Amino acid sequence: MTVLEILRFSAGDAQAADIAAAIKRMFTAVEAAAPQGIQYLAAQFDEDEFLLVLHLADGVDNPLTQIDEAVEFRNSMRHSGSPLPQPHRIRVLGNYRLLEGVGARQS
């Protein structure tokens, strides 16, 4: 069964820049590891709101548990003093080429 999870959370204004930097480090590591069977998206909006979407292909174990920066990011969320955001599985009702060809790498 394909897994699609979404995680949405808020951070204090003071934490938002640190979280954004940690997400960029994590995605650099994920891109370097180039795991197969995964699609992963992170977005920031309203300056202190974040959205993470993870898609795992059928039969693929989550490779993020083996990428140090992803583990560090998860641990930093756990120790932030805020309740740990919980991912939610979602069912896609419609998808027309979402983000196809969009380069997320920005300096």
Image (spheres, rainbow, N blue to C red):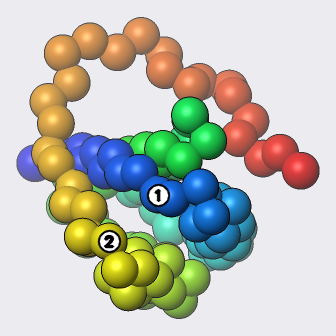
Within 10 angstroms of label 1, few (less than 14), some, or many (20 or more) residues? some
The amino acid pointed to by label 1 is Ala
Please report contact status of discs 2 and 1: CB closer than 8 Å, yes or no. yes
Task: For mark 2, give the secondary structure.
Answer: loop
The answer, for residue 27, to whether it is visible in the render is no
- Counting from the top left corner in percent of width and height, residue 70 is at 49, 77
Residue 27 versus residue 5 in the image, above or below:
below
Marks 2 and 1, how far apart at CA = 8 Å
Which residue is labeled 1 in the image? Answer: 11
Within 10 angstroms of label 2, few (less than 14), some, or many (20 or more) residues? few
Which residue is labeled 2 in the image? Answer: 82
Q: Quadrant of residue 100?
A: top right
- Counting from the top left corner in percent of width and height, residue 77 is at 40, 76
Residue pictured at 71% horizontal, 41% vertical: 104
- Counting from the top left corner in percent of width and height, residue 90 is at 16, 36
Give 67 or 16, whichever is nearer the viewer. Answer: 16
Q: Quadrant of residue 82?
A: bottom left
Which label sits on residue 58?
none
The answer, for residue 79, to whether it is visible in the render is yes
Residue pictured at 14% horizontal, 45% vertical: 89
